[in-house]
């Protein structure tokens, strides 16, 4: 299951609060595609399937489907708000190779 840093947890909580919709969770998934084989997908979801993996970080719920959970084991989601390094980034020790854009891996 993917872990969230404190910075990522704070930013996700802020974004969920702005949505003004109860029971939203951050869904993180790995899908086939991208230039290296797999790509990450993140979005807010109000649906949680019975076989989803659910982890809570304070008020933030993170949901991952079973097949993505295997590929995200040991991964960390971080958020940076700097001039050159801004946005969410996933550090995944399971990725053997990443593409130049950093959006896909194999």
Image: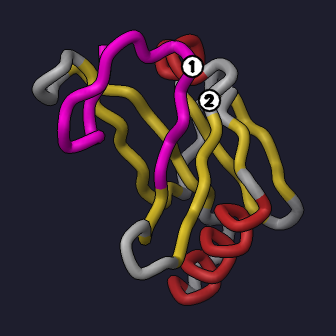
55 or 49, which lies in front? 55
How far separated are the C-alphas under marks 2 and 1? 6 Å
**Residue occupying the point 52% across, 13% down:** 94
Can you tell which of label 2 and label 1 is closer to the viewer? 1
- The residue lying at 27 percent from left, 40 percent from top is 103
Colour scheme shown: secondary structure
2 or 1: tag closer to the N-terminus? 2
Secondary structure predominantly adopted by residues drawn in magenta: loop
Task: Pick whichever, 98 or 83, lies toward us.
Answer: 83
Per the rendered image, the range of residues in magenta is 89-106
Q: Secondary structure at mark 1?
A: loop
Instruction: Tell me the quarter of the picture where residue 85 sits.
Output: bottom left
In the rendered image of this protein, does residue 8 appear above or below residue 30?
below
Q: Residue 36 appears at what percent x and percent y?
A: 18, 20
- Residue at the disc numbered 1: 93
What is the quadrant of residue 100 in the picture?
Answer: top left
Query: With 72 as the anchor, is 33 left or right in this view?
Result: left
Q: Please state which of residues 59 and 7 is positioned toward the viewer in this rendering.
A: 7
At a point 51% along the width and 83% down the height, the residue shown is 19
- In depth, the one of 103 and 58 nearer the eye is 103
Task: From the image, tell me which residue sits under label 2.
Answer: 75
User: Does the magenta portion include 91?
Assistant: yes
Do the CB atoms of the residues marked 2 and 1 lie less than 8 Å apart?
yes
Count of number-bearing discs: 2
**Looking at this rendering, what residue extends furthest in the left direction?**
35
Extreme-right residue of the structure: 58
Name the quarter where the C terminus is drawn: top left
Of helix, strand and loop, which one carries label 2? loop
Label 1 environment density (alpha carbons within 10 Å; few <14, some 14–19, many ≥20): few
Q: Is residue 14 above or below residue 4?
A: below
């Amino acid at each position: 299951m993917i872990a969230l840093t404190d910075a990522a947890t704070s930013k996700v909580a802020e974004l969920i609060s702005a949505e003004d919709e109860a029971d939203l969770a951050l869904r993180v998934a790995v899908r086939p595609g991208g230039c290296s084989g797999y790509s990450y997908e993140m979005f807010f979801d109000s649906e949680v399937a019975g076989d989803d993996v659910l982890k809570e970080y304070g008020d933030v719920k993170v949901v991952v489907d079973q097949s993505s959970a295997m590929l995200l084991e040991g991964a960390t989601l971080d958020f940076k708000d700097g001039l050159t390094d801004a946005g969410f980034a996933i550090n995944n020790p399971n990725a053997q190779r990443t593409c130049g854009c950093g959006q896909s891996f194999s």
